[in-house]
Amino acid sequence: MAKFADYGFNKSHAAAYAWIAYQTMWLKTRYPAAFFAALMTYNANDAAKLSAIKDEMIALGVPLLPPDVNFSSGRFLPEASKGAGGGWGVRFGLCGIKRVSGALGELDESRETAGAFTSLEDFHSRVGRVFNKGQLEKMAEAGAFESLSRNRRQAFSVLSWLMDRKDKAPAGQTDMFGGAQAVPVPSSVLDTPEWGDISNREFGALGFYVREHPIDQYVERLISAGIRRKDSFAGFMREHGIAALPKRRLCVMVDSVQVKQTKNKGIPYVEAMVSERGESFRISCYGERGERPEWTIARFQNVLETARQERSPVVFVCSLSLGDGDTVWVNGDQVYPVEAYLENVRGPMTLRLDLSRIAVGLEPEQSMREVELRKAGKNEEADEMIAAARRQKGVARAARMVAHIQRASENNPTGEMSDFRIRDETGFELAKGQLRQNAHVATMLKQLELVSLQENVGTIAAAPAAPVRQRLAA
C-alpha cells in the first residue's frame, strides 16, 4: 500500500492533472461549441461516445447541427446558430458518417472558390469524383443533401443516376459550344418518394439519431399509458425514500441482447442494453418467475432481438430498485413491441403531409422575383420564397383534408373521438381537428394522398380487443 502511495499520489502528477482539468473546464465553460467540436472530432469513429456527447450538449444548450454538404467539413466545427443559447452550435462533421473518412479538403476548397452548391447536379460536377456510391448513400441517409433535394432518397437516386450516366456516356458527346452536353435528370428519378424508414437509415449511417428519435412519435400516447422515463421514477424514489418500485413501465430502444448466468448459482437471464432519449442502461430479465411463468428466457430473447434488428421501441413492464450511490437496478418482467402495447391507447394523432410533393405554381410577380434572385446569386432567398409558397399551399391542402376527415367521422359515428394534427416534414403544424377511430376512417386515412402514416399514426384497430394494460393485469 505504501509503495503504491509513493507513485499513485505523486504530487507532480496530481498538479499536472489538476492543471489540465482546470484548462478543460475553462474551455468547456467559456467556449462550449469549440470544446464539443474538438471532442466529437476526436471520437468521430465511436458512435456511442458521440451520442453521449450530443446528449450533454443538449443539456447545456449547444445544438448539434445536422450534416450538410453546404456547411459541413470533414471535422466537427463550431458554427454560429440562431437557436443556440450562446449563439453557437456544432456542425456535424462528414467524417462522423459511416464509410466517409479523411479531411475532405476538396469539398472545402470547392465551396471557398465557387461558393455553395446550388443543386445535386452542381455538387456532382464539382466534387462528385471525391465520393463513391456507397459513401453518397450513407451521406443521403444521414441527411447531408437535404438543402439540395426534396428528400433523402431522391438525393441518392439523382446522384446515382448522374454517376451511372457519366460511366455510360458516349465519348465526345458535347453541346454546340464544345462543352459537356447537359442532360436533364428524368422526372421518374426526380419524383422518387422518401424512404419509409428514414430514422432507421439515419441510425445506420451515424450510429445514433441526430434529428428525430424513434420514440418521439409515441410520446403523447406513452404519457397517456402512464409510461415515464427511468430518471423520473428514480427521482421519485429518492425524494420519497422508496427503495423499490414494482410494475412500472419504460419505453426504450434495444441496443444489444445477451444471455448470461449469475455468478453464484449459474441462473440464466437475458441482459439487454437499452437507451432512452439521453441515457443508456441495462435491464436484466429472469425467465419463468412467480406470476409470469410464460415469460421464458427464449421469449425475452426473441422479442428483444427482433426489436434490436428492426430498431423499433419496446415497452418493459419492470421493477426498479435503488443501489449504491446513483445506481438504479432495473429487472424486466415482461416486454412488448411498442405498437402492440399501445394498440388501444388513444392519444393525439399526427399525420405527415409531404410538402415536397406539392407542385408550386408561383404567381407571375413571384416567378419574376425568383429569376431576379437567382441571377443575383441569392439562391437561398429564392428557395425560402418557394418554401413559403409551398407551405401556404400545404396549409390550404391540410384544411381540405381536415374537413374530409371530419365528414367521414360524422358519417361513421362509431369508435372513440381523438384529436389529430397535420404537420409538414419539419414538424410545422398545418391544421388540426378531431376524428373517430374506427375501421372506415382508418381505411380512408391510408388512401389520402401525400399523407405518411407509417411513423406517425398508431394502429387503429378495426375490432378493438381488450386493452393491453387490462390483459397484463389479467
Image: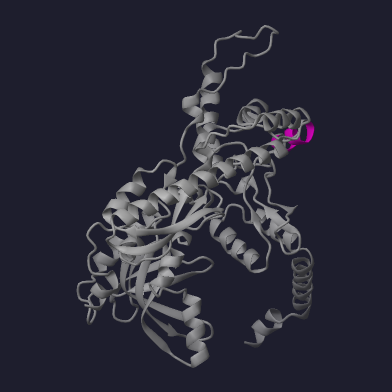
Chain part drawn in magenta: 107-113
Could you tell me which residue is drawn at 59 percent across and 33 percent down?
A: 131
Q: Nearer the viewer, residue 453 or 435?
A: 435
When asked about the image quadrant of residue 467, the answer is bottom left
Residue 148 in picture, x, y percent from top left: 62, 36
Could you tell me which residue is drawn at 73 percent across and 60 percent down?
A: 33
Q: Nearer the viewer, residue 380 or 89?
A: 380
Left or right of residue 14: residue 171: left
When asked about the image quadrant of residue 123, the answer is top right
Residue 27 in picture, x, y percent from top left: 78, 66
Q: Which secondary structure is most common in the magenta stretch?
A: helix
| Whether residue 372 is visible | yes
| Above or below, 30 relative to 168 | below
Q: Nearer the viewer, residue 184 or 44?
A: 184
Left or right of residue 177: residue 334: left
Residue 119 in picture, x, y percent from top left: 64, 31
Could you tell me which residue is drawn at 57 percent across and 17 percent down?
A: 183
| Above or below, 107 relative to 170 | below
Residue 348 in picture, x, y percent from top left: 43, 63
Whether residue 350 is in magenta: the answer is no
Q: Quadrant of the N terminus?
A: bottom right
Q: Quadrant of the C terminus?
A: bottom left
| Above or below, 131 relative to 219 | above
